Amino acid sequence: MRKFWNRDKEQITKLPEAAEIDFSSGTILEQFEDYLSEHRKVSDIVAFLSAQDGRLLALSKDGGIPEALEDEVIEFSDYFLQEFDDITYSARIRAFGEEPFVLRLADSLAWYRLESEESLLWEQMSDVHKKEASTLRDTLMSVRGDRALDFVTQEDTRTLDIPAVLYPDEIPKMRQLLLYFCAFVIRGRGTVTVEIIGKYKSQVFGIEVSPIGIWMPRSKEAMQASECTTPSGFVLEPEDDIEYIEIERERF
């Protein structure tokens, strides 16, 4: 799942030299894949990001970035964060002092598009279902620890990681994002799987939404069965570092 915010951990040291990129040769992702064929160092990747930053910053000051290029920015960022996030993170922050502009732009664009789409769908929900989404959001926010959440419906799957500690300025955005995801699973009558990540053992619990759009906790037995049973009915043993638990729904 894309990151909808970035944390700056180090101060800028020296801006990297930008790589020479033929911006007319395909999409940003295609340019990156072609670049990697001969430039395979972390410093090379940082130079590529610097080149894209220069290009995008210039366009943003000169009439704006075309929508097609916005799509390329999001596509590249999704791929980059999936494949190269951890291995280049320290180098990126040392070089730029924060995330490079291309990744921050992708974050802003994706958030704007999600917010525009979800706010319209939210307005179309009934008051009962809005309350269900809100109470589910509050319940999931109250869980302590690093959390990995999967929101699943028949149409789509969304994932979200919530760190154990949020900075004060991150909390409103996280609450809004989580509300949108909860509304998504209420509308789709889907399920939520939550993993509370521990140092030696993680805990897993589930939520399911009834056909009338009311959410309820799943029993730990049901969670274990769903996680450890193949489509043909073969039952696996749970992993030693996983504990299936259940939560209670408060009376809202």
Image (cartoon, grey):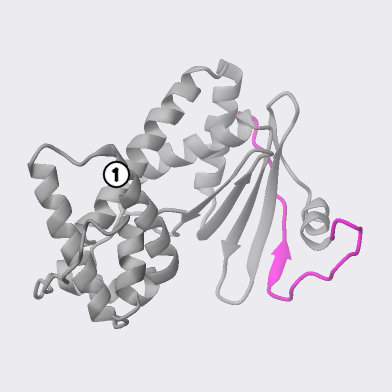
Task: Please state the extent of the stretch shown in magenta in the rendering.
Answer: 230-252
Vertical placement of 143 versus 7: above or below?
A: above
Q: Is residue 119 above or below residue 63?
A: above
- How many numbered discs, if any? 1
Main secondary structure type of the part rendered in magenta: loop
Q: Secondary structure at mark 1?
A: helix
User: Residue 236 magenta-drawn?
Assistant: yes
| Amino acid type shown at disc 1 | Glu
What residue is rendered at 68% in x and 74% in y? Answer: 241
Choose between 192 and 1: the one closer to the eye: 1
Q: Position of residue 209 (x, y in %)?
A: 70, 34
Is any atom of residue 4 visible in this view?
A: no
For image coordinates 15% across by 39% down, the residue present is: 64
Regarding residue 55, the answer to whether it shows in the image is yes
Find the residue positioned furthest to the right. 233
Vertical comparison of 155 with 123: above or below: below
Q: Nearer the viewer, residue 115 or 225?
A: 115
Q: Which residue is mark 1?
A: 70
Query: Going 44% across and 64% down the picture, which residue do you hit?
Result: 82
Side of 128 relative to 40 (left or right): right
